[in-house]
Amino acid sequence: FALGMAFFASPAFAEGGAGAPHLDGSALGLAWVVPFAGILLSIAIVPLAAPHFWHSHFGKISAFWALCFLVPFTIVYGFEISLYEVLHILLLEYLPFIILLFALYTVAGGVRLTGSLQGTPLVNTGILFLGTVIASWMGTTGAAMLLIRPIIQANSWRANKVHIIVFFIFLVANVGGSLTPLGDPPLFLGFLKGVDFFWPTTHMLGPMVTVSAILLVIFFVLDTYCYRRETQAPAAGEAMERLGVEGGLNILVLGGIVVAVLMSGLWQPGLSFEVYHIHLEAQNLLRDALLVGLAFLSLRITRWESRQANAFTWFPIVEVAKLFVGIFLTIVPAIAILKAGTDGALASVVSLVSDNNGEPVNAMYFWLTGLLSGFLDNAPTYLVFFNTAGGNAEILMGPMANTLLAISAGAVFMGAMTYIGNAPNFMVRAIAEERGIAMPSFFGFMGWSCLFLLPIFALVTFLYF
């Protein structure tokens, strides 16, 4: 279908700087987005309709949809541009993305809380509050991987606990990463584009506190209701065991991850080399090497018995790696069409962010960046609207600060709308299901997010945009 429709389009490539081919999104029809829609629908439907098939073949499904894009794209537009786009997305986006997740997952999985916590509403709310606070400083992935197992263990005796994981995704895996470039990938990309490191800390604080406070209050009320409906009690004396930490050295290794990521934004040696027109910069290569090294250091200094007691397995990160490589590849035409702005097939969407006088409509920046971030990768979506707003960090931090705030808040907050909006969402779901918690389907989770998040985002729009 995509191949047939594509022949009615004009050539979709042009030569970039130094002969680099690149997609001309204005020439792409919406038919090229079909494989991306296919992988999203597969993630939504197959685990629910055929869970055993999905568990065994999700990697093949991801590869199938990737090939549904790559094969016709290569036939229509040629091997050179196809190779360039694949290498570009893998070397500059997917590999750094999965390496960071691998490092955070591995290191955080080596920290184990010993003793017992009883999953009362007060304890659960406290864990969510702690995770929300630390997520901006160790990343949403790091905070989520550090605390997801303790909160599951604390509530292992409870029958009603799905809501705990859902709100954990809302707060720890998304909203908590609002205050620094270390918290969430979109803010880190803004940092690399010239946005001051502490700009999100001062400007995102108000919206972040508003959303977090409301969600924590709602969670406490909901969890209290569910707690009172429990028909069994925790094992006697469980809450009396003294709390402790195993693998505490991994907390220092997490600090090393923070330093490595921060270094890649602050150190600009001007060294790079080229792979098929793609510039690989020294600071980014060093960052990735350090992250891999820190992950293996964590494996070296942590007893495997401790990881086993922490219910640590490689399955969640393997699932994310296989599914997101398909997502990153099939998303290429969708991002190219968005980058084409008013010249692309989604011109009607892009034009909504400016009024008749060309002035930005910040409420629309918030909602369009956010809703697209819920279904596309939130990092490139942030960049698309960052560039749509002019792309000048000094202007965006100055007279257009509210526009930058709208883009930033939309990308970070609404990553919580779906499982694929932010990578930690999928990892948390995988870990919860591995521990026997029947998580909502793709659309079921969207039901939770629409019910609890959309009214809060409407309030944020009224208060801030």
Image: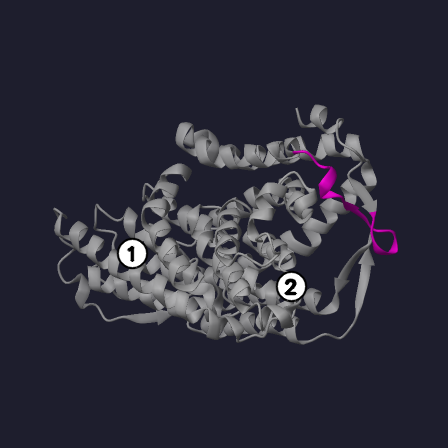
SS for callout 2: helix
Q: For residue 256, which numbered disc appears in the image? A: none
Q: Residue furthest right?
A: 19
Locate residue 119: give its quadrant: bottom left
Q: Position of residue 240 (x, y in %)?
A: 17, 68
For the N terminus, which image quadrant? Answer: top right
Label 2 crowd (10 A; few <14 / some 14-19 / many >=20): many
Q: Is residue 149 magenta?
A: no
Q: Position of residue 316 (x, y in %)?
A: 47, 48
Q: Is residue 21 magenta?
A: yes
The amino acid beneath tag 1 is: Gln
Q: Position of residue 169 (x, y in %)?
A: 39, 54
Q: Which residue is mark 2?
A: 288
Q: Which residue is mark 1?
A: 153
What range of the chain is rendered magenta?
15-29
For the C terminus, which image quadrant? Answer: bottom left
Task: Reply above or below: 27 against 259.
Answer: above
Locate residue 259: give its quadrant: bottom right
For the residues bearing labels 1 and 2, Cβ distance under 8 angstroms? no
> What residue lies at 38% left-to-right and 70% top-to-bottom?
133
